[in-house]
Image: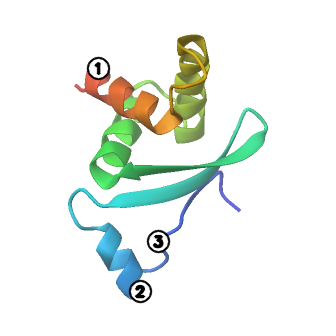
Amino acid sequence: MSQTESSTGTSANPKARATMIKGALQKRSMRIAGHRTSLALEIEFWEALEKVARARGLSLPQMIASIDEGRAKDGPDASLASAVRVYVLKHRQ
């Protein structure tokens, strides 16, 4: 099993095609800091996050773990999905 999995399945799946709609959420599961977590983001945010991670030489789980560590400093009410979106907006190239 890979570190990151898409929950959308194959492109032949109607549910998978629906997630390709602009603005649709795509849920991915990964292991971060030793535990499995799922994160739902718009496809555009996943693509931007992957681009930032590649530019920094990090895997997607490593990049999200780094964002998660920063989020912990902001308090328990900050959701990981929101923290990732804000990070992407601040670090767009």
The residues tagged by marks 3 and 1 sit, at their Cα atoms, a distance apart of 28 Å
In percent of width and height, residue 44 lies at 27, 48
Which amino acid type is marked by label 3? Thr
Q: Which residue lies furthest to the front in this view?
A: 77
Determine contact: label 3, label 2, CB under 8 Å: yes
Location of residue 70 with respect to 55 vertically, above or below: above
Q: Residue at x 49, y 58 (%)?
A: 27
Counting residues from the N terminus, which is met first, the one under dot 3 or under dot 1?
3
- Disc 2 packing (10 Å; few <14; some 14–19; many ≥20): few
User: Does residue 26 sit above or below 37 in this rendering?
Assistant: below
Q: Which of marks 1 and 2 is nearer the N terminus?
A: 2
**Relative to residue 64, is residue 26 drawn left or right?**
left
Residue 16 x %, y %: 39, 76
Image coords of residue 45 (percent x, y): 32, 43
First-in-chain label (3 vs 2): 3
Name the residue carrying label 3: 8
Q: Can residue 32 be seen here?
A: yes
Q: Name the residue under label 1.
A: 90
Residue 90: image quadrant is top left
The residue wearing badge 2 is: 13
